[in-house]
Image: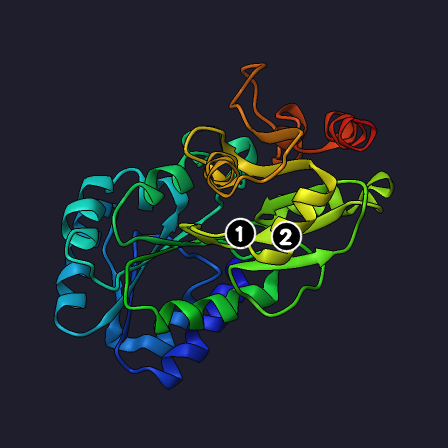
């Protein structure tokens, strides 16, 4: 999604002159055209992410819409205090962009992975978390973020190839009668690729916080009673806990609930993104077993 993001932010700059781009000394072979387009509105803040967020907050206070770009853990976890105090407490429209959410940076290891970002940021007041699914989503998500007056976090990853409806918080990907699957981010495509999942209804959640479940989805859950969730993120404070709370509040009739999420590094080893997904039960044989378990319950 990095290339889609670069082109989309260039397009957005031609329409909104108050956009400012800040990078934490990253973007080689991706941001060169962004730098040319933004000119003096392009700032290399160096390896100083905490300062970058504070500078962005000051710019937002003066009427600009700053975009802070880096590898996901560098731009969310390292400057967490500044995001909390300088941005979210003042409800400033700073747009944080994290590349490689989840296990996106593969063999570079845990320092470059981020399976805590959704949970950490959705705890902060006024923050909206935006998670594109495919390449088309990226440009639409950027337009959504520009229109939103609150702080935002854009989680970039390897784009899914599945075509969907236009970007919004909830989208139904396909109909089904044997169970309901709810996912966030491109990892959901791992289920869509399974022949065994052809009779499952699949929904995509792309914006947090989530405070409601669509009536159509709620009715289907009550009818089938079987739900599987999938996210490339820790279970704690992740999507499945947010949805489980809503199920309880709504009185949804969930008889079987299978949450699939990242648990970290069971083997203590590193591999590419798909390898980590498989080790965490989000792809491969383990995912197939979970889908079959849902169907056969």
Give the Cα distance between marks 1 and 2: 7 Å
Tell me how the rendering is colored.
Answer: rainbow
> Which residue shows up at 64% across the image and 30% down it?
257
Towards the viewer: 48 or 89: 89
Secondary element type, mark 1: loop
Q: Is residue 98 left or right of residue 22?
A: right
- Residue 205 seen from this side: yes
Above or below, comparing residue 16 to residue 246 in the picture: below
> Which residue shows up at 18% across the image and 67% down it?
60
Q: Residue furthest bottom?
A: 15
Residue that badge 2 annotates:
217
Above or below, comparing residue 175 to residue 5 in the picture: above
Residue that badge 1 annotates:
213
The answer to which quarter of the image holds residue 50 is top left
Q: Residue 240: give x, y in percent of width and height.
A: 52, 36
Q: Residue 263: give x, y in percent of width and height.
A: 53, 23
* Disc 2 packing (10 Å; few <14; some 14–19; many ≥20): some
Q: Is residue 91 left or right of residue 244?
A: left
Dots 1 and 2: beta carbons under 8 Å? yes
Above or below, comparing residue 236 to residue 99 in the picture: above
Secondary element type, mark 2: helix
> Which residue shows up at 57% across the image and 24% down it?
270
């Amino acid at each position: 999604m990095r290339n889609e993001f670069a082109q989309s932010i260039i397009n957005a700059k031609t329409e909104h002159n108050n956009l400012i781009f800040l990078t934490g000394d990253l973007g080689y072979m991706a941001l060169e055209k962004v730098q040319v387009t933004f000119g003096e509105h392009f700032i290399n803040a160096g390896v100083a992410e905490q300062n970058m967020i504070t500078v962005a907050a000051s710019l937002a206070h003066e009427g600009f819409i700053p975009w802070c770009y880096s590898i996901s853990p560098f731009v969310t976890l390292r400057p967490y205090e500044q995001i909390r105090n300088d941005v979210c407490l003042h409800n400033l429209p700073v747009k944080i962009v994290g590349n490689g959410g989840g296990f996106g940076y593969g063999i570079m290891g845990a320092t470059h992975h981020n399976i805590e970002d959704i949970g950490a940021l959705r705890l902060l007041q006024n923050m909206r978390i935006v998670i594109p699914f495919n390449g088309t989503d990226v440009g639409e998500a950027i337009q959504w973020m520009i229109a939103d007056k609150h702080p935002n976090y854009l989680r970039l990853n390897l784009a899914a190839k599945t075509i969907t409806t236009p970007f919004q918080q909830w989208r139904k990907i396909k109909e089904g009668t044997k169970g309901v699957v709810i996912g966030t981010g491109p990892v959901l495509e791992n289920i869509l690729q399974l022949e065994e999942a052809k009779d499952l209804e699949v929904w995509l959640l792309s914006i947090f916080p989530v405070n409601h479940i669509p009536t159509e989805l709620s009715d289907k859950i009550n009818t089938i009673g079987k739900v599987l969730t999938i996210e490339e993120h820790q279970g704690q404070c992740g999507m499945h806990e947010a949805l489980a709370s809503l199920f309880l509040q709504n009185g949804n009739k969930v008889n079987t609930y299978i949450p699939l999420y990242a648990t970290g590094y069971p083997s203590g080893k590193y591999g590419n993104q798909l390898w980590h997904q498989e080790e965490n039960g989000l792809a491969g044989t383990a995912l197939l077993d979970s889908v079959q378990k849902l169907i056969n319950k």
